[in-house]
């Protein structure tokens, strides 16, 4: 697990958007999505529910 992935997760949660977190970090949206997926793979759980174009933090994401 990389500390940068945790920082990005926090930024996505704070901004409520992967795209906005990417803009603020000067990264591409796929790069941010990849970091989130790496965290989800590391913890073997989903950190966000992705429904109808919206992100909602899961209970596991709230614990993290």
Image (spheres, rainbow, N blue to C red):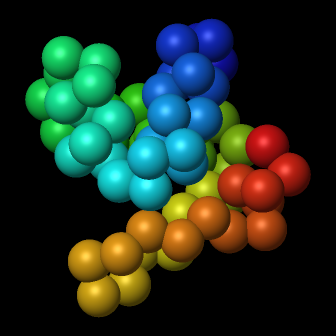
Outermost top residue: 3
Percent x, y of residue 63: 85, 51
Q: Position of residue 24 (x, y in %)?
A: 27, 25
Residue 38 visible at all:
no
**Horizontal relation, residue 36 to residue 18: left or right:** right
Residue 18 in sight in this render: yes
Q: How many marks?
A: 0
Residue occupying the point 22% across, 46% down = 19
Furthest-bottom residue in this view: 52
Residue occupying the point 19% across, 30% down: 23
Vertical relation: 53 (above or below) 24: below
Q: Is residue 30 left or right of residue 36?
A: left
Q: Residue at x 43, y 68 (%)?
A: 55
Relative horizontal placement of residue 12, taking residue 1 as reference (left or right): left
Q: Residue furthest right?
A: 63
Which residue is rendered at x = 59% and y = 35% of the image? Answer: 10
Depth check: give the residue in front, 56 or 34.
56
Say which quadrant the N terminus sits in: top right
Image quadrant where residue 3 sits:
top right
Point out the residue furthest to the left here. 28
Quarter occupied by the C terminus: top right
Q: Nearer the viewer, residue 1 or 33?
A: 33
Quarter of the rendering containing residue 52: bottom left
């Amino acid at each position: 697990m990389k500390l940068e992935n945790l920082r990005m997760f926090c930024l996505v949660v704070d901004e409520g958007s992967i795209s906005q977190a990417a803009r603020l970090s000067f990264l591409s949206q796929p790069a941010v999505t990849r970091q989130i997926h790496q965290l989800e793979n590391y913890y073997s759980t989903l950190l966000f529910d992705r429904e109808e174009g919206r992100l909602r933090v899961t209970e596991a994401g709230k614990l993290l």
